[in-house]
Amino acid sequence: MGNVESVVRFENVGLRYGAGPEVLHDITFALEPGSFHFLAGVSGAGKSSLLKLMYLGHRPTRGLISLFGRDIATMPHEEMPVLRRRIGVVFQDFRLVDHLSTLDNVALPLRVAGAPEEEVRDNVVEMVRWVGLADQLRARPHTLSGGQKQRAAIARAVINRPSLLLADEPTGNVDDKIAMRLLYLFEELNKLGTTIVIATHNEALIDRFNHPQLRLEGGVLTVPRPV
Amino acid sequence: MFRQRSDLPLEHDPSSRFLPWLIALMVYLAVLALASALTLGDAIGRWNQELTGALTVQIAPLTGADGGAAESRARRDKALALLRGTPGLVRVEPLDEERIAALLEPWLGPGNVGAGLPLPQIIDVEIAADADIDVAALSARLSTAVPGATVDDHGEWLHDLVTLARSIELAAAAAVLLIGLTAVITVVFVTRTGLAVHHQVIEMLHLIGARDSYVAKQFQFHALALGLRGGLLGLALAVITLVAIGLVGREVEAVLMPRLSLSAGQWIVIALVPVTAAAIAMITARVTVLRALAKMP
Ligand SMILES: Nc1ncnc2c1ncn2[C@@H]1O[C@H](COP(=O)(O)OP(=O)(O)O)[C@@H](O)[C@H]1O
Ligand SMILES: [Mg+2]
């Protein structure tokens, strides 16, 4: 797969939840550093499940997954946190912490990584401004609109300058105008070197950008032709 | 702008309200059990001292004989001479007749201990602290010299008492252990409930790269705080109870009832109970969380 080490590499990966049917079959693909992909497919196709495997939220039932050149199956438990910190995730349901302000929510990845508090303060305020939530610094999630929560979730996902950003339907709760702005935001990050995968069922949105697509249909992945 | 706060709102969990009370109750019971074990331990020590420190020699009155006082006194003097000639006995003192009569009076009724009643002779013997007296041999020598003389080292009676006290002491120690075990189980369940209630947030923290110890710290310090709060409350209630029992005990002043008075060292041991309870709560919470998180993908 070229001479550059892939950020993500799947080989014949299969996934089933418990004793249920297999929801992902023989997934094989690789993402090069600095790439930008859409993960397309109708609802129920398995997009969230594939992202979950990528952010180590679930172990595959079979096959090989390696992240940043390391096989995750053989990685010791205590090395996982450092690896996870290189991955930013925008969860479909945001997963903001109810009793924390926007600032404290966005600050979580830094605090979790043990960053000094002055550094946290400066970075977080800047990041919250960047996603346009400057006037919601101290608001709790339940007082934010869907789009505002989405932006808080994105701010939290990128605060650590991750090498890999995975976003699950990040435009699901916003109108087209804001959706476009969020995608421009992801493009900016991508220009800074972050590898990006955006899962969405919104074909119209995908068509407005010229990024390669990973397509999921019934748990089977179609990889774009190499350019 | 930033307040240092826990990521998990554990202080709003229902467990935060009832755990301190449970710990207070457990510390209260543990302190009472421990105090009784310590007090009994002291009493056993004292009784053991008495067991090895004193003898009573009894010389039965001669029946059928003329019961002359002179005869009786001669037998007593013979026994006294033998005892005083035995090395290791520091005090050999006969009880005078009024004293013996006074001792018998409660059983025989006032005025019934008359001149006509043959009374035994009693000699109080104190053994030197470092002496190693063979009571059986002494008893044999004495009864040969003075037929009807017996040596009572209070052994059987005190032995029974010490055995009883030891079993109570053991039961108290077992109670303290069981209370500790109950505390561990309680904290395990409270922590598991907390893990279930906050599963979403914990999973998110885990996914964004929190180490297991980061999550465990929030639970363990929460448990430590609750444990200390409950423990101090339980200690306060227990101390009030102990002081009250001590006051009542002073009134009663029964001969056999061990006095509930604790030394400074023993008070320190008791003060360590809530600290230990809080430490148990903290360690239990930590281990519970780490074991649960180790199962996450
Ligand atoms: N946690 C889960 N347990 C069991 N089945 C699941 C779970 N998550 C998803 N699925 C199933 O896996 C399939 C793919 O779902 P998902 O990955 O959410 O697709 P998408 O994100 O494309 O809508 C669906 O059939 C869904 O019911
Ligand atoms: Mg989905």
Image (cartoon, rainbow, N blue to C red):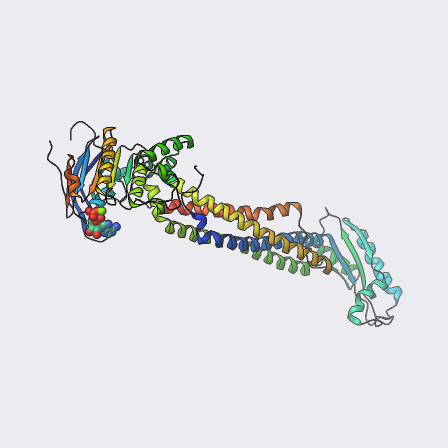
Frontmost residue, A41 versus A83: A41
Outermost residue to the top: A3
- Residue B123 on image: x %, y %: 80, 58
When asked about the image quadrant of residue A136, the answer is top left
Image position of B288 (left or right of A173): right
Image position of A210 (left or right of B107): left
Residue A145 in view: yes
Task: Point out the image quarter for the N terminus of chain B.
Answer: top left
Residue B253 in view: no
Image position of A195 (left or right of B268): left
Frontmost residue, B148 versus A42: A42
Frontmost residue, A117 versus A182: A182
Give the number of marks. 0
Task: Point out the image quarter for the C terminus of chain B.
Answer: top left
Q: Residue at x 87, y 64 (%)?
A: B71
Frontmost residue, B144 versus A84: A84
- Residue A212 on image: x %, y %: 15, 35
- Residue B271 on image: x %, y %: 60, 47
- Residue B59 on image: x %, y %: 79, 63
